Image (cartoon, grey):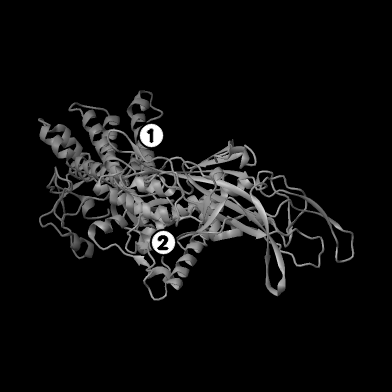
Amino acid sequence: MSFSDAPLNVSGDDVHLGFWTDYSHSGAQKYSLTLTTGHGNLFIAFIAIFVSLTGSYIWDIFRFASHQLLSRHTGQNVIYHQRQVALCNAGSPVSGFWKFWDLSLGWRKHKQSRIFTNFFPFLAASFILNAGFHVAGVFSSRIAMSNGVEVLLRGDSCGLIVVNTSNANPTSDYASQVAFQSRRIMSSYTYAQQCYDNNGSFQQACPTFPKPSLPYTITRNMSCPFPGQGDICRNNSGITLDSGFLNSQSDLGINTKPEQQFSFRTTMECIPIQHENYTALQSLNGTLNSTRTYVNFLYGYASQYGNASVIGNKTYQYPAEWPSADPTRYANIEYSLTVKTSFTGSDGKFINGFSSFKPISELQPAIGDVQLYFMSLNDISFASPVDDPWYSVHQKFDVVNVAGGPSQERYYRDDFMRVLGCVSKYQYCNPNAVPNATCTPLTGAVPAQEAAYGLFDTENQAYFNWTLQALSQAASPGGVVTNLGITSLLGRTAKFLSLQPALANNQWELEVENWFKVALADMQQNIVLQATGPGDPSVNRFVKKLNTTDQKKLCTTQKIRSNSYMNFSVLGLILTLAIGVLIMIVGTVLPTIAEHFNHNGYKSLEWKTNDVFQLQRLAYEGVGAGNWKRATHDCPTTDLNYPLPDLDINDLNHPRLRNDEVLEIADKPTLNQLRGGYISVPNPTLSGQYPRSSFSDD
């Protein structure tokens, strides 16, 4: 299952790449770097190499410091000198481990070698440092987040969808807008089914919004929310759904400074209501002199949105017809569902022109907006009775089997239509107001929005007003039913043709909870859509773009989640690079600094002469070979034309440099001449300069 029905389509061009400030964190931790996954992986590889290189410098510092601390300007045994040479020439922890391992094995049979104190500390240190470097290389990727990371939208196409009613064809424009709105709400319905799943089984497929689902609570067995109490409510088993205070930053992903953040809350109280004393039958003449009976629901005068006049003295009218067991008669095997809404002003009175009915006193709360949900089961048959007070199915029929078999037992609706009543309330808060948080009253949508316009100062109010537009255009639970109709019913999903399987005794509660979840999901989606633009050619022409620099800042405040990008902590990067560079500098200059403060110079000279090239120089000088220079540098040199003695391999178990006889030659042959084989060697006389082995293989 995936969020594939959504008009929300965030492309790579919509995401800001580079450095940005994430106000969900504080201090230096709020700075982030966003890269594509491909570039991010390359950057992680660089960081891993850098950390590994830094680790090699740490090892260099350790072995140099150990060498200097252990250096002694007195005669020492062979173990001392081998240990010093191993420290000087072990270029990595792995190399160091094996060198000290070889030393331990070589001296293990000598009781006075004290292997544990002489070699084990360095074995342990090299092993620990090597393991630490590998772990650091792995954990260096922790400065990057790649799975469902929060990224900032560029907002290049952001804007409000506004229909220009002065257009030559406003009806067509309005139809296009409504069609897009219905598609958006349908996608929110799909999203709610997979991402608001209580056990979270599908939430891994919900990466787009800052939170896969917004939190809410549901409280059952609540009292009647209407003034009429027992006269209007069917029972005292209502429910209350409450989102709690949703934070604009952490819940909605609006990336603004703390002083620009706000909280939003919505509640919904619902209960099945009576209809027995609030209905009247009416017969109306139809075509061809036919007469049809209707049931009128008398919950208040109907009105028309955008028109202040009332329409008749009824709220809703529906055909008063009962199901028939006759299989040959036309049957309406679908549900019927509609909603009527009344908005309440700050004075507690009905707002005409915005509402679809004016409630009677029993249904008019002091605060909050009222929705009445009318549902008929029509000719749908049920396999068993349903005790749910909104569905209510108990009328038993024996349905004739047209195939000639025995009749089948079916159950049908108890009433023409039943009604749910709900009260919706909204609240906005400025949680960072000084000295205390400031909130609007928990009230209807219109007075809550009116009061919200004064929550912030002039500069910060613009950020709030921008998001308020998206919140006000998102679907309420009543808007979900208005746009989706019977598609919004969970109970309908199991129906096959005219037969409906058994439903839960609290099915109405499940339906209301689902509408509430869809409304929350649509709020999430509409906020992001405002930043990305609809991306739909049929409504793009209705988008009112923001033009000024200050206005465009509003477009760059929306975050989403994505698996296609990586976020790097700028603080982590700076610390990693700065500490690494510092370690490299220390490792590079430490021998020079130590030499400067080493007054007698022995320790520094020992470090230099323990190097492999200097040891080679000492070996050749020990047999009198070469005229060596740069004896205290990294690379000693001698005459390129001077041949150096090779190995004496008479004893294969004890090779050494040749030093059996030394020759004095009047004219020194070059190495190339010796290789060419055309030099005649004169009779040598013994001297202390040139070994015979340099000139012949005898």
Q: Quadrant of residue 301?
A: bottom right
**Outermost top residue:** 112
Expressed as whole percent of the image width and height from the top left, the position of residue 569 reads: 32, 46
Picture layout, residue 414 above or below residue 403? above
Quarter of the picture holding the N terminus: bottom right
Q: Quadrant of residue 80?
A: top left
Say the numbered circle drawn on residue 322. none
Residue at the spot x=47%, y=46% of the render?
214
Measured Cα–Cα span from mark 2 to mark 1: 66 Å
Residue at the spot x=24%, y=61% of the render?
548
**Is residue 532 at least partly visible in the picture?**
yes
Expressed as whole percent of the image width and height from the top left, the position of residue 518 reads: 52, 52
In the depicted view, which residue is nearer to us: 215 or 120?
Answer: 215
Residue at the spot x=15%, y=36% of the render?
605
SS of the residue under disc 2: loop
- Frontmost of labels 2 and 1 is 2
Question: In the image, 600: left or right of 160?
Answer: left
Expressed as whole percent of the image width and height from the top left, the position of residue 630 reads: 12, 46
In the depicted view, which residue is nearer to us: 512 or 631?
Answer: 512
Picture layout, residue 684 above or below residue 79? below
Question: How many marks can you see?
Answer: 2
Expressed as whole percent of the image width and height from the top left, the position of residue 351 reads: 44, 51
**Is residue 91 at least partly visible in the picture?**
no
Amino acid type at circle 1 is Gly
Question: In the image, 634: left or right of 131?
Answer: left
Give the residue at mark 2: 10
Give the residue at mark 1: 106
In the depicted view, which residue is nearer to us: 347 or 645?
Answer: 347
Amino acid type at circle 2 is Val
SS of the residue under disc 1: helix
Residue contact at pointers 2 and 1, CB within 8 angstroms: no
